[in-house]
């Protein structure tokens, strides 16, 4: 696997592949790779000839109180995992490569509507940072296909909407969430959990599964969501939001909607866990 940190080396390799008529699959990450990320590489490999990954802890998507300096960085282990997975090129830029003028003078991409609410409300500016960096990475890598984990459901909708609204010729592939045996969604942030918190954390997904069953035969979405929230809080987590919404627009679900998603975030000790569950109403 070739590892490059500068734009010129990246573009030279991408151009060489494009001239040979090869297609490019892209997996953008912030590193600290786990099985979830590696499954993105596996999916990309099914769809493209050459696989490019990036590791960049993007300062633009972290809020003022969020601790970017302590975000886990495990570059050597990440590289070994990507080699084993068959990734061909890894882009590891520093912030001054991506934002040479500094964040204040950087033009940005703001995706309307699907960026609002949920994580967009709890983390102001977060999705502007995500959309901007993903747009820049897309322009640098010029992928045919890019894979994103569905654990970050709202992020996938933001990126899909950006690609549609701005006519980017890229196929966005959402990939199913990888889970621990306990049901806990794999996340780099799980590393912040103590043993006791890790034992409590699966209540988040369990309560969402309970909720998914209930809404098949009861359309009191708000009342049921409140009950699920109470179960999660009773187990020692603190719910940030838990909503039943339309799967594509992310607007609050109405009685007629059939394709829904439950979106949730909860604090567990220092970690802010997010998860979601897609539900198709059968009747
Ligand atoms: O999901 C992530 O790890 C990040 O938000 C992404 C898409 C790599 C952009 O920085």
Image (spheres, grey):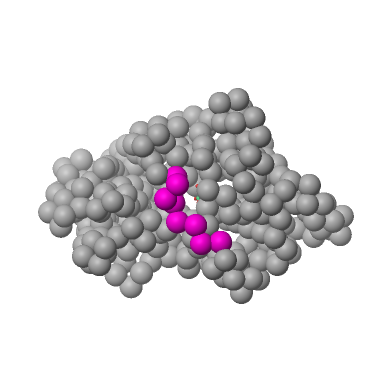
Depth check, front residue: 197 or 160: 197
Measuring 62% from the left and 46% from the top, which residue is drawn there?
Answer: 94
The quarter of the rendered structure image containing the N terminus is bottom right
Residue 260 on image: x %, y %: 36, 47
**Residue 282, quarter of the rendered image:** bottom left
Residue 281 visible at all: no
Measuring 49% from the left and 29% from the top, which residue is drawn there?
Answer: 112
Per the image, is 61 magenta?
no
Query: Is 204 rendered above or below residue 136?
Result: below
Residue 191 on image: x %, y %: 36, 61
Query: Is 251 rendered above or below residue 1?
Result: above
Q: Main secondary structure of the magenta part?
A: loop
Residue 54 located left or right of residue 130: right
Where does the magenta region start and end? 68-75
Depth check, front residue: 177 or 51: 51
Measuring 54% from the left and 68% from the top, which residue is drawn there?
Answer: 77
Residue 105 located left or right of residue 269: right
């Amino acid at each position: 696997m070739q590892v490059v940190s500068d734009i010129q080396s990246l573009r030279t390799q991408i151009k060489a592949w494009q001239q040979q008529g090869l297609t490019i699959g892209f997996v953008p990450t912030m590193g600290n790779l786990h099985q979830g990320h590696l499954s993105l590489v596996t999916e990309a490999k099914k769809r493209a000839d050459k696989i490019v990954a990036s590791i960049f802890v993007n300062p633009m998507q972290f809020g003022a109180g969020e601790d970017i300096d302590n975000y886990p960085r495990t570059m050597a282990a990440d590289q070994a995992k990507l080699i084993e997975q068959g990734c061909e090129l890894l882009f590891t830029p520093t912030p001054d490569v991506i934002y040479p003028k500094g964040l204040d003078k950087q033009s940005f991409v703001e995706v309307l509507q699907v960026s609002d609410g949920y994580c967009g409300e709890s983390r102001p500016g977060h999705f502007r940072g995500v959309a901007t960096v993903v747009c820049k990475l897309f322009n640098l890598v010029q992928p045919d296909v890019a894979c994103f984990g569905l654990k970050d459901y709202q992020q996938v909708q933001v990126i899909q909407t950006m690609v549609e609204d701005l006519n980017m010729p890229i196929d966005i592939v959402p990939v199913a969430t990888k889970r621990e045996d306990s049901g806990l969604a794999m996340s780099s942030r799980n590393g912040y959990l103590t043993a006791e918190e890790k034992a409590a954390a699966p209540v988040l997904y369990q309560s969402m599964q309970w909720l998914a069953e209930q809404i098949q035969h009861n359309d009191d979405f708000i009342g049921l969501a409140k009950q699920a929230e109470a179960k999660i809080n009773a187990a020692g987590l603190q719910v940030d939001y838990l909503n039943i919404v339309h799967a594509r627009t992310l607007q609050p679900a109405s009685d007629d909607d059939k394709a829904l998603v439950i979106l949730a975030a909860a604090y567990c000790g220092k970690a802010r866990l997010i998860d979601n569950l897609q539900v198709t109403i059968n009747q």
